[in-house]
Amino acid sequence: MKQKFMAPVQKNETLTVHITDLTYEGLGVAKVDQFPLFIEEALPTETVQVQVVKVKQHFAFAKLLKIITPSADRVAAVDPRYTQAGIAPLQHLKYEKQLEFKQHQLALLFQKAQLNVTVAPTIGMEQPVQYRNKAQIPVRSINGQLETGFYRRHSHDLIPIEDFYIQEPAIDQALLVVRDVLRDFQVTAYNEENHRGVIRNIMVRYGHHSHELMVVLVINEELVDAEAITQAILKKLPQLTSLLVNVNHSHGNRLLGDKTYLLAGQETITDEILGTKFMISPLSFYQVNPVQTERLYQQVLDKAALQPDDLVIDAYCGIGSISLVLAPKVKHVYGVDVVAAAITDAKANAKLNGIDNVTFVTNKAEDQLAKWEADGLHPNVVVVDPPRRGLDASLINSVLAMKPERLVYVSCNPATLVRDARLLHDGGYNIKQPVQPVDQFPQTPHVESVTVFERD
């Protein structure tokens, strides 16, 4: 009979441990008889007292009770709620060390995959706070009062928050105004247990360059007194460009429903990236850190080494943000995205900027690339900016069949980037210049990067 594994730690046990590393999620790592223990808010080199809270077969989680020997890289946390809610889980780590951590995470993954790659220092921000241009904030009733805030990590307990630290201050102000108006009109908050109540979430989007402001009220039931609520919000937020309602009857975690209607102002707001203007609707995917997005896209421009006669494919093109930045440098750009509304926006954005050397198609990226390849399209450069799951294997096969000179990979997930890098490497594409991490999400463990694959 197989002997049951016994972990060297037990739930509720109190231990003193030494932190040796950080995980990709920013958790401190300690080892007890080679058994990993993961601890929120702990930093390498620290000796800490912890309490074990969960024991799994190969690792355990513990909560930090006391820092006995602090790290020289530790800074005072601005507000513990930002860690509890997952808004700024790295706020206790010096910013320059956050940038080093992100560079190290990428380098380690390439090393484990036995790919000989140089990772450049992470491009950071001068002011790594108040950067987000979009918020989707849950609304719940606490002690009979409507509150806005953020969920405690791994739970649905709302922590009331008024200053979100990493959002544009204009967004925080708008959230408070809207919350107070909804309180004045005694609008009920959504209850997840019985699926009753009116207001579920408040979404706010802000144009970094345009200063235009959009507020979307996400509702579960009819918004009674909609006209009076609209006028009250406009009176307190005269700078508001767009006020909309989105109807979401779903019982799950879906943030927006399919039906949106206008209460006041315009249907969209505008902003710009590297001088190119974009219309942004409630459902548009638009990078949330405008300062770093310009740096990210500049890296794409520089590393793509574009020529005036080049044909470019932009897979996962969204509202055309990368396509339209590249288009003035090349002969033609072909963009594809699975979201029909995004392609509608991309076409409108091309028209807005007077750009006519672009073709946008609604389809799955992997299916459309296979079609273009069958049609004999031979791009010089392919740009991919996939979701966290990375590239579909069939898309990689289509790229390999098309034989572009370069593939520029914008990644939001180092693990899937490195997985895809192996497949591209096996297909004859190698990384010959340093991978460039860009810090799109300061105070969090997330990292974006730009990698160029060149055909041998």
Image (tube, rainbow, N blue to C red):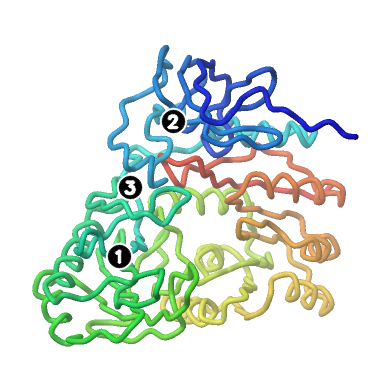
Q: Is residue 222 above or below residue 232?
A: below
Q: Amino acid at mark 1?
A: Val
**Mark 2 near mark 3, Cβ–Cβ under 8 Å?**
no
Image-based side of 434 in relation to 231, left or right: right
Query: Type of residue at label 3?
Result: Ile
Residue 345 horizontal/vertical position (percent) = 47, 79
For the residue pair 359 and 346, the one nearer the viewer reads as 346
Task: For marks 2 and 3, give the one nearer the viewer.
Answer: 2
Instruction: Name the image quarter holding the N terminus.
Output: top right
Residue at mark 2: 41
Q: Which residue is mark 3?
A: 166
CA gap, disc 3 and disc 1: 19 Å
Mark 3 against mark 1, which lies toward the viewer?
Answer: 1
- Is residue 252 left or right of 230 when viewed as pictured? right
Residue 37 disc label: none
Q: Residues within 10 Å of mark 3 (few under 14, many from 20)?
A: many
**Residue neighbourhood size for the residue with mark 2, other residues' Cα within 10 Å, grouped as few (<14), some (14–19), many (≥20):** many
Query: Which residue was labeled with disc 1?
Result: 139
Which amino acid is tagged 2?
Answer: Glu
Query: Which residue lies at the image location 54% right of the left edge and 63% below the top edge?
Result: 322
Label located before the other in sequence (2 or 1): 2
